[in-house]
Amino acid sequence: MNSIKNILRENISQMGLIENLSLPYIFMVFGTALLCAAILYVVYKYFYRGAVYSENYGLLLVITTLTVAFVIMTISSNLVLSLGMVGALSIVRFRAAVKDPLDVGFLFLGIGAGLAAGAGLFVLAIVQTTVICMTFMVFLFLSRKRKVYLLVIHYDDSAEEELLRILKTTRSKVKSVAKRDGQTEATYAVTAKGQEILNSITAVKGVEYATMVAYTGDGQY
């Protein structure tokens, strides 16, 4: 029986299914995962486009990357333990709602970086994280040339014709209109330079006030 166990152990070792973890290797795994997590944290924090930035989600990216690296490193060190780990993780249920689809992309990138680091693919983990983050920043820079705002205007009905003329000079779409006693409050989604369009509208006679806020919706115009 012992000879059979020894044969199985030798065959598994030769197949690379069991990896001996040394202290330098462990530090290398966590160092790589931490570097990738730091890149994700900085890019997510300084290039976040949502209405309210969540510091907890940034920390979640770091914890997720390190945890995945730890799990993969543990699984790669012991074949039997890996089977038990798969069974244990299969009962975990995550029910937290993710409001921004972009957050899901960052989370998957953190998981991918942790997988690569835990598997010992250190160069791949760093390169993939850097390249994907740089690609994200390039496309974000290109998309910033087209800013969408929500424009709320309160005006007399006599100013409606002039306002429509100004709004035709930019890409706009009506979101809501409320009328009462000769007064109108309208909300538009506009694509323009915010300060210029706002100055033009407030200069129109009959406009009581105009408010412009950044629009983070997914509407297409």
Image: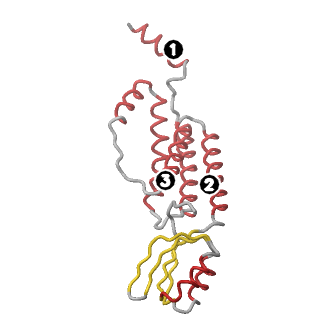
Res 29 → quadrant = top right
First reached walking from the N terminus: tag 2 or tag 3: 3
Out of 109 and 9, give the one closest to the viewer: 109
- Say above or below: 6 vs 212: above
Out of 24 and 156, give the one closest to the viewer: 156
Helix, strand, or loop for circle 2? helix
Q: Position of residue 94 (x, y in %)?
A: 36, 46
Q: Position of residue 89 (x, y in %)?
A: 37, 36
Disc 1 vs disc 2: Cβ atoms closer than 8 Å? no
Specify the amino acid type for callout 3.
Answer: Pro
First reached walking from the N terminus: tag 1 or tag 2: 1
Specify the amino acid type for callout 2.
Answer: Phe
Mark 3 surroundings within 10 Å by alpha-carbon count, few (fewer than 14), some (14 through 19), many (20 or more): few
Q: What is the CA distance from the residue labelled 1 to the residue labelled 2?
A: 44 Å
For label 3, the residue is 101
Specify the amino acid type for callout 1.
Answer: Asn
Residue 52 disc label: none
Out of 40 and 106, give the one closest to the viewer: 106
The residue positioned 48% from the left and 46% from the top of the image is 66
Q: Position of residue 96 (x, y in %)?
A: 36, 52
The residue positioned 67% from the left and 57% from the top of the image is 138
Q: Position of residue 54 (x, y in %)?
A: 45, 63
Quadrant where the C terminus sits is bottom right
Mark 2 surroundings within 10 Å by alpha-carbon count, few (fewer than 14), some (14 through 19), many (20 or more): some
Quadrant where the N terminus sits is top left
For label 1, the residue is 11
Front of the two marks 2 and 3: 3
First reached walking from the N terminus: tag 1 or tag 3: 1
- Say above or below: 20 vs 44: above
Helix, strand, or loop for circle 1? helix
The residue positioned 67% from the left and 61% from the top of the image is 142
Q: What colour scheme governs how the chains and residues are painted in the rendered image of this protein?
A: secondary structure
